Image (spheres, grey):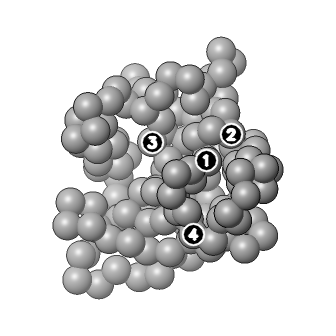
Amino acid sequence: MIDANRVPDVSDDELLARYVMQSNHLRSNKTVKADLFMPHPYQELSLTRYLDANIEEVLALGEETAKELNKTLYGRADIQAIKCKVGSLQVVKDPTPKNPNHANIKGFPLGKPEQKAIALELAADAKFYPIQ
């Protein structure tokens, strides 16, 4: 896990995880739908960085997040940070007390059709890993 006192900026080559907590965000072929990457109703999208973390730590953060939200963790969709820099989007560090590896995708357009077009691109670049 990243040292909470020294959190570096997100680099383009970093791997990021978007937790899947809704079954309707998955297709039957185990790929993710664009809705997983829709920021609505917010203008940013939450992710967890892999930087200085092992897979068990990333999964534990997902389980804890799902538990706090009273949801089920179905898995994670991994995506490289550079793939999240579509149009005006940027990936920024956003450490929290419980997750120093937390980051956000910011800069989504306000219009839902524009958001959907970006979300389709992000979903196509993401690889889904179910909970084993």
User: Is residue 61 rendered to the left or right of residue 39?
Assistant: left
Q: Which mark is residue 37?
A: 1
Q: Position of residue 70 (x, y in %)?
A: 26, 31
Q: Nearer the viewer, residue 75 or 113?
A: 113
Which residue is rendered at x = 34% and y = 26% of the image?
Answer: 72
Determine whether the residue tagged by mark 3 lies in a helix, strand or loop: strand
SS at circle 1: helix
Q: Earlier in the sequence, mark 4 or mark 3?
A: 3
| Residue underneath mark 4 | 106
Q: Position of residue 110 (x, y in %)?
A: 68, 63
Q: In this rendering, does residue 44 appear at all? A: yes
Q: Residue at x 32, y 71 (%)?
A: 95
- Which image quarter is the C terminus in? top left
Q: Compared with residue 28, is residue 78 higher up or lower down, i.e. above or below?
A: below
Assess whether mark 1 and mark 2 are in contact (beta carbons under 8 angstroms). yes
Mark 4 neighbour class, 10 Å CA radius: few under 14, some 14 to 19, many 20 or more? some
Viewed as shown, does residue 76 lie left or right of 29? left
The amino acid on which the numbered mark 3 sits, given as a three-letter code, is: Tyr
Q: Nearer the viewer, residue 75 or 45?
A: 45
Which one is in front in this view, the residue at disc 3 or the one at disc 1? 1
Query: Which amino acid does the dot numbered 2 rest on?
Result: Ala
